[in-house]
Amino acid sequence: MTKPLESIRRLPAVGVLAERQMGGFLAIAALVGVGVGLGAAALIFLVDWLEEFFLTVVVTQGRAWVFLTVPTGFLVAWFLARRFAPEIAGDGVPEAVAALEVHSGRMRARIIPLKTLATAITIGTGGSAGREGPIVQIGAAVGSVISRRFNLGEDQVRSLVAAGAGAGIGAAFNAPIAGMLFALEVILSSFAARHMSAIVIASITAAVTSRTIIGDELALQTGVYRLQSFNELILYAGLSLVVVAIGVIFLWMVGRLDGFVRPRARALGFVRPLFAGLIVAALIFIEPKLFGTGQSVINELLGGGDGSSAWWVLIVLALGKAIATSLTTTSGASGGAFMPSLFMGAAVGTGFALLVSEVWPSPVASGAFAVVGMAAMFAVVGRAPLTAILMVFEVTGARDYQLILPLMLTATLGTFLAERFHADSIYSLVLRHMGIKVRNTGEVDILDTIQVGTVMATSPIVCVTSDAVASVEERLHRTRSHGLPVLDGGRLVGVITLSDIARADSGEQTVAEAMTPRPATVVPSTPVSIALERMAVLGVGRLPVVDEEDPGRLVGVFRREDAVRAYHEALTSSTDMELRRARLAQRTDPGAGYYEFRIPPGSMADGRTIREVSWPEGSTLVSIRRERGVEVPTGDTLLKRGDVVTAFGTLVSKERMIQRLNAGADEPTAEIWLDEIEAQGDSSTTLGAGPPDPAPPDGS
C-alpha cells in the first residue's frame, strides 16, 4: 500500500514543471513590458521634442511655415515606409492585428526604430495624428521579436504580441488596465483566459517603466465632476447622437480615402503624401489647434476651458480634426487615430454642453461632457465600448465614480447606433481594404470546426538550402506541385515556389538564394478557416505546418486541396449535428411517442424499399414485424402489405403517416387498424408500448 506522504511527493512533479514553465513565460512577458515601456518613452520624448520645436518655428516665423513643415514631414515618413518597411505606414493597430491574423504574430525587428522615427517626424512637423496607434505596433513588434528569441510556440507568440500591443497603451497613458482591455477587445477580439496573464504582466511592467522615465503625471488631466441629477442622463443620451454623427463622418472619410489610395499607392507615389500634406497644412493655417496630437487642446477642454468659444465653433473644430486626421493616416505617413478621436470627443462634448446650458435649468459642467464625449467617440470609432469606458476613466484620473453612469450610457448607446450606420471600426475598415476580415467572437464558420492537423499532408515533399534550383524545378513538375518547404539542418527556413524559380538568374543557383525566407506558417490546431484567410491574403496555395511548441520543426503542409477535404468533413459533421438535434427535438416533444401502423394492400409503400418512400418529417422507423419475425429497418428493407411498422414521432407526424400510407391503397386499412386497436383498449400508440399481434394480411 502506498503511503500518503509518498503519493503527495509524486503528484506535484508535472505540476511543478508546468508552474516553472508558466513562471518563465511570465518572466518573458515582464521583459516584453520593460521593452515596450522603453520604446514608448523614446517615442513620446521624440514626438514632444519635435512638436515643440516645429510649433515654435510656426509661431515665431509665421503660420505659412506649415506649408513647408507638414508636407516635408509626410514625404520623409512616406519614404521611410516605401524604402525600408511598408508596414510602418498608417495607424499601426491594423498592422499589428494583421501580423497576428496572417503572419502568426511574426513582425520584423526593424519596425521598432523605423516606426518610432516615422511617427515622430509625421506628428512633430504638424501632422494631425496620435502616437498611441504607433506605440501599439511598436509594442507588438517588441513582443514578437522577444518571443522569437526564446523560440516560443505560436499561441505563446500571439499572447506576447497582444501583450506588447496592450502594454503600449498602458505605457503611453500610465494606464495598465486600459492597456489590458485594449489588447483583449481590439487586438485579439477575444477574452480568452490563456492570454490574460501575459497581457496583465506586460501592461503593468510597461506602465511602471514609462512612468519611471517620463514621470508620474497622467497624459490627460481633468477636474472632479459629479452627476448633478439623474435627469442629466437625458443630456448624455443626446450627446451620444451628436458623437455618432461626427464619428460616422470620420469613419466614412477614412474609408473612402483609404479605399481610394491603397490600391493606387504605387501609381500615386510621392504625390500622395505631398498632396495630403498641403491640405493638412492649409487646415492648420486656418486653425492652429489642429497641429499635431492636440493633447494640450484636450487638457484645456477637460479643465472646463475654451468656454468663450461658441458651441458651433467647437463642432467645426471636431470636423476639422476629422478631415486632417483622415488625410494624415491615409497619406502613407505614420500616425494613429486614437488621440484624434479623443480630441473630437472632447470638442463635441464641450460644444454640446455649451449649447444645452442655454436651456437646461441647472448649471452644466462642460468638462464632464468633454470626458464623456471622449469615451463615446472612441467607442464609436474603435467599436470597443468596454475599453472606452475604463480607458477614459483611468486615463483622465477621474476621482469620482458618479461619471461611470454617463460613460456607460454614451459608450454603449454610441456603439449600438454607430453599428447601424457604419459596419466597420477605424481598424477593421483598414483591415478589410487589406483583404483581412477578423471575425468577432460568436461568429462561427463551418471550417472553424476542423483543424489543420486533421487534413494536412503529414509527409510533405521538401528540399534543402543546398539543392540546385534546376533540380527543385524538375521535382515540382514531376510531383505537379507549385512549391516546397525548405529545410536547413532539419529546421524550416523558407519556401520555394515556381515564381521564385522563375525569378532566379539560373538553374545553378541554390535554393537558399532563390527561396522566400521566413514564410507564414500555421500549427496543427489552427482552424482551417484561419489558414484559408492567410492563404488568400498572401496569395499562396500552401502553408507549412509547424509544431505547436517549436516553430522551426516542420510537421506537415496545408494545401488548397486539403481545404476541400476539410469542407466535406465539416459539412458531414454539421449534418450529423443537425440530425442529432432533430432526434432530440422529437424525443422532447410533449406529444411524441411510439406508434404502429400496418402497410395496406396497394399502398404507396407496398413493394418499395424504405429509402424509396417519402416519410413525413418528425418520424423515425424503429422496427418491422412480418408474421412472427422482427427486423431492424435499413434503407434497403423491402416493405410488403401487412407489415406492422413501429415508429417514433409526434402526433402530427403520425397523422401524416396514416394519410400518406392510405393514399392509393385498395382499402384504407392503416387507419382502420389503428381505430380497432384503440377500441380494444390497446395502448400501443402511447410512449413505450409494445406492438400488438398482427392481423392476417387478408383480413380473415
Image (cartoon, rainbow, N blue to C red):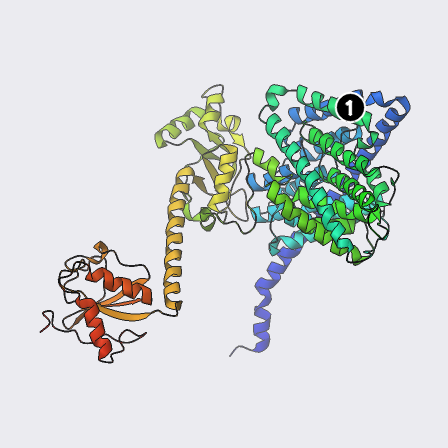
Q: Where 183 falls versus 309 (above or below)? A: below
Where is residue 37? Give x, y as percent: 76, 44
Where is residue 20? Give x, y as percent: 64, 58
**Most foreground residue, 200 or 14:** 200
**Most foreground residue, 470 or 611:** 611
Where is residue 511? Give x, y as percent: 49, 28
Q: Secondary structure under badge 1?
A: helix
The quadrant holding residue 381 is top right
Question: Can residue 495 be seen at all in this image of the molecule?
Answer: yes
Please name the amino acid that badge 1 sits on.
Ala
The quadrant holding residue 262 is top right
Q: Which residue is under mark 1?
A: 282
Q: Where 617 falls versus 628 (above or below)? A: above
Residue extending furthest toward the right: 60
Q: Is residue 377 left or right of residue 157?
A: right
Q: Is residue 465 left or right of residue 335?
A: left
- The C terminus lies in which quarter of the figure? bottom left
Q: Where 21 falls versus 173 (above or below)? A: below
